[in-house]
Amino acid sequence: MLIKNIKLKNFRQYKDVEIEFSRDKNKNLTVILGENGYGKTTLIRAFLWCLYRDNGFKDKILLNQDIIDMMEYSEKSVKVEVNLIHENIDYRITTKESYKKREGQVTVSSKAKTSMIKDGIKVPDAAVDIEISKILKKELKDYFFYDGENNTIESASKKGSLKEAVSQMMGIKKIETLRNYFNPTSTSGVIYNLNDDLVLDAIQAQPLQDELDKLINKKEEHTVKIRDNLKEISRIEEQLDNKEAVLKANVDIQQDQIRKIELQTCIRESQNKVDGDFNQMISMMSNKKANPFLKILFAKCFDQYNLERLTENSSFGSEESLSHISEEAIDQLIQRGKCLCGTIIEDGNVAYQHLVESKAHMEPHDFGKYLSDFISAEIANAEYSENLVSQIRNSSSALLERIELIETNKEDVEEIKKRIAGRPDVGDIQREIDMLKNQKNQLLGQNNYIDENSLPDVISEIESIRKKIEKASLQTKENDLIKKCISYAEAIYDITNKKVLKAQKETRKYLEEEVAEIFNKIYHGDRQIIINDNFDIKTLTNNHQLDNSTGTETVKNFAFVAGLLNSIKNHVIKDESNEEDMDVDESYPLIMDAPFSDIDAEHIRNICGTLPFYCDQICIVLIQKDFDVAVEGIQNKIGKLYRINKHSETYGTIEEEEIDV
Amino acid sequence: MNMNNNIIIEKEKMDAIITEAYRQINKKEVDGQLKTTSVAKIVEFMKKELSKDVD
């Protein structure tokens, strides 16, 4: 980064100032002369405000007081513009803040906003700070814009940002960043990312392969079963052919065989029926009602006693019949003299007479009633017996017919047997044929089931397992690739880590040598420069660290900055893979408000005379007295010379002067 | 050529990855913080570069 110019508009006492900075390699020094209180520090702070909107003033109103006094209702703005070159690209960076005045009070109406033109093209507002950070990180500003009033290098060093600054400027930061990306312990780094991609639940191929083998065996078993069944079917068909041939050869006796079977069946059935009929007859005759002996006895009694007329000769069944009342009951009523209905019974009266007559209709006079019932029942039995005889007669006839049929059939069977003697039994052959066909059908059914169900199921499972194996195989390949990536990432981390450590070590060494060389040129005492691993710079006297005076501290700080810039020029680590990076000229300016009040003349001469030889661009803001001391050593390096003119407390100008020293 | 976890590390491939990593980092990096998109791009590049000879 080299600064071309800075333009200030209404920035504190500078209403309209422009300073061009020398970029001549041989005359790289720009000197700005200004007495104390003239606004030297304001110039340095203008850079910081423009680049980082860093307002280091107690009074936060940056607008020129004269403008404030004159402004009424219109807005007024402060603007600082820095034009610079970085990595061979032109940048215009402008920061502007607007103010308004109300009732005598000035307030910010539009906060400081930075805009950028990069290589002639406006950079989007959101990207401006990022672009500035790429040019010079804010953390490094104190090393290049040296505010002597606040000894900013010292304060930056104490903040612990020195190592970070050196790392950034020496190019180590790039390797560190690369290392961080490949750091195995970084949860957002490449290796963690790769580990996340590992398929942790990858299906192992071997168990699947075992399962596949089993399924293939199962499929083979089904295939063998089908083949065996087909062989068996073939054998059965052969048998069937033979049997059917035999059947065909004996077709002439087939009818006889069938007839024989039919007759034998008929004989068997008739025999069964004969047995049934006979048993039925026995049952009928065994019935109590059907006892033929009783029937004969009864018939004789019936005739002898004329029982059939018995009922006609008795009062049984008449209206007068009182078969359920006994004579003793009537005698009891007569003796009592009073009927159940209350009628008085007296000897000779109507009631008495009526009761005496009633006795004729009572037992034993009604015994005939029982006989009558008996007779009726026996008449029914006699009818049944007559029917039974008829039935037995009929059954006997059928039985005899059936027995005759059996005998006839048996004779027919015997005749058939004689006719087919010595010939095969076609019935048996037919049964064997039927059995064989049944076996064949069962085997065909098995094969069909295997073909249509078992085999397709197994084939489908095999396909499914094969797909899983393929997937598992792919996952394994993916994991192998990721593991390979991790190995490379770890290797890159190892390499970059070593590179960073080596770079830090070498940089510390270079820096220490450079700073020591410069310090020894500037400092006229007997002190030694030591820089530790954190890039903290210390001075030793006879190997002892002593407190430095303010002047010595200033010398040390300038030596450090100059040494750092020289190290950047000579030892910066470049990204070898980036051609653009290799071409970039690592230049940085040193803009310093030189606090030489505590430094003796020799040191002033040394500082001013030495720094231009180590920096690409340097701007020293100092008072005339110090310039007079230093001028002898720097006169050949001055490219630009300016003087701050203080016209009032609120108005200053900066005019370029002829270099005639 | 080097060995890491029984995997041969080829310098050319490693250099290609480093170059790509720098390219991604330079594109996004402004404050030294790891960027998710950069990491993803680097991982993607590594897989592509290293899968060339993976059967």
Image: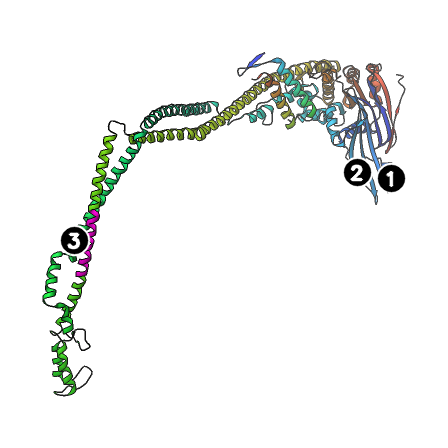
Q: Look at the numbered disc 3 and give the secondary structure of its residue.
A: helix
Give the residue type that dot 2 points to. Answer: Ser
Give the residue type that dot 3 points to. Answer: Met
Examine the residues drawn in magenta and state their main secondary structure. Answer: helix
Measured in 3D between alpha carbons, the distance from the residue under mark 3 to the one under mark 2, in whole angstroms, is: 139 Å
Q: Look at the numbered disc 1 and give the secondary structure of its residue.
A: helix
Residue A352 is inside the magenta segment: no
* Quadrant in the picture for the N terminus of chain A: top right
Measured in 3D between alpha carbons, the distance from the residue under mark 1 to the one under mark 3, in whole angstroms, is: 157 Å
Say whether residue A255 is left or right of residue A165: left
Q: Give yes or no for contact between labels 3 and 2 (Cβ–Cβ under 8 Å).
A: no
Chain at tag 1: A
Please provide the residue range marked out in magenta: A382-399
Q: Are marks 3 and 2 on the same chain?
A: yes
- Name the residue beneath numbered marker 3: A285
Q: Position of residue A381 (x, y in %)?
A: 17, 61
